[in-house]
Image (tube, rainbow, N blue to C red):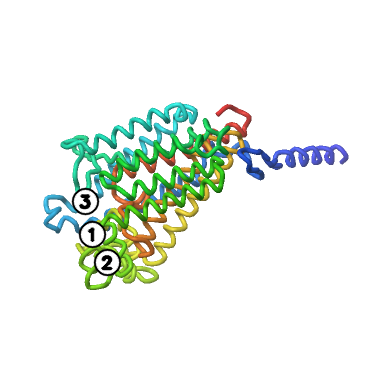
Amino acid sequence: MSGLTQILRRWGSRRQRRDAVPDLPVHIGGAHYAGLEPSLPGMAEFDRALVWVCAGLLVFGLVMVYSASIALADSPRFAHLSSTYFLLRHTLWLVLSCLAGLVVFQMRMDWWEWLAPTLFLLSVLLLVAVLIPHVGIVVNGARRWIALGPVRFQPSEVVKVTVLLYAAGYMVRRMEVKERFFRAVLPMALAVGLVGVLLLAQPDMGAFLVIAVIAMGILFLGGVNARMFFLIATILVAAFAFMIWTSPYRRARIFAYLDPFSADHALNKGYQLSHALIAIGRGEIFGVGLGGSVEKLHWLPEAHTDFLLAVIGEELGLVGIVCVVLAFFWLTRRMILIGRRAIALDRVFSGLVAQGVGLWIGFQALINIGVNLGALPTKGLTLPFMSYGGSALIVNVVAIALVLRVDMENRKLMHGGRA
């Protein structure tokens, strides 16, 4: 009997040691990161929950793009296309995105840190190429695309990733001077300013807004002095306000946002917003049913791209919109936590990249949702993972692949291995 008791005690002590999860109190950049659980033997090598949520958004987006675009073939503009044209192209882009994500996932984060300046310079050259006649393609008055055979490529989407990588690497290199405002921030500000000038020349103010938020977020997370950070934020807000006020086109959008149903705006700059609100209002709580949208029948322009959420609201109601919002909130929080874990392991570049992707995806989703709900002025930003658009889809999946790579390297380190 005593022998059995000893065996049970030894088994219990081994189980206690196995289940014990020590804290990881690490001091990086003036912040303490503790209570982050390391991986235990048998756990996945990457965050499977993150993969499943992203996959769910991608599949849901594929279904809704088909629903929103199925009637476009009836319009004169798309009369030469079949009803499944956008579905098939979106499916092709989805497959290419997954392949690109797999390739990116195989590359170590220190390789990305080394390549970041080169990739940033190449993306700037692409922005210059867009502005060259006969190279850049003009659509609806904006020169934002480059033709690659039968497909169109949008360099401004790639710049979001390269600016993120460059800013993260820059803050790691400048960590020792982060309290010296001009030495730490001025070169980065010049780089973002150059990108902004090229984007505004297209014009693509929405992409510039997202890139500015990415750069500002990396500066803040990298430990730039808080007072200087808010000073930069104030300058940026003033600059965007000035650009809006001096542009009659952008100013008209603001006035239409304030009163989209007025006689002056309902058939002009407020047309998209007013019909998006009508679509969401028709959906009420549970929607009119998948495929039952009326607004997508040539009433709501760009229903399969910028205003996909309005079709979701009409067909699936408030329930569908809330599910989308909760999914993006969960994704943003998850990526921020993965970044914190990397910083706790003294992998500052990887941590800033993961947190930067979280800020980027969360902010762009917030803007798109706000525009569809009438809470923000109309801005040409797609809903990540869901809206139709090949360049944006590939870049979003690549960004998630970077976060998964960060998470995998975190887990390997916490297993006692090498990243």
Residue 336 in the image: state x and y as whole percent: 53, 46
Q: Indicate which label's residue lies in the foreground, 3 or 2.
A: 2
Where does residue 272 sit, x and y in percent of width and height?
26, 62
Residue 271 at x, y percent in the picture? 24, 65
Residue 39 is at least partly visible in this image = no
Q: Tell us which disc is closer to us: 1 or 3.
A: 1
Q: Give the residue at x 27% y 71%.
A: 261
Earlier along the polypeptide chain: callout 3 or callout 2? 3
**Residue 275 — which label?**
2
Q: Is residue 34 visible?
A: yes
- Is residue 46 toward the left or the right of residue 314 in the image? right
Q: What amino acid does circle 3 point to?
A: Thr
Q: Is residue 17 left or right of residue 250?
A: right
> For the residue marked with disc 2, what is the amino acid?
His
Element at label 1:
loop
Which residue, given by chain and number where applicable, does mark 1 sit on?
301
- Residue 84 image label: 3
Query: Which of the two discs, 2 and 1, labels the residue nearer the N terminus?
Result: 2
Crowd around label 1: few <14 · some 14–19 · many ≥20 (10 Å): some
Q: What is the quadrant of the C terminus in the image?
A: top right
In the rendered structure, which amino acid carries the disc numbered 1?
Pro
- Residue ID at (22%, 73%): 263
Residue count near mark 2 (Cα–Cα under 10 Å), binned few <14, some 14–19, many ≥20 = many
Residue 252 located left or right of residue 210: left
Q: Tag 3, which secondary structure? A: loop
Q: Is residue 251 above or below residue 47?
A: below
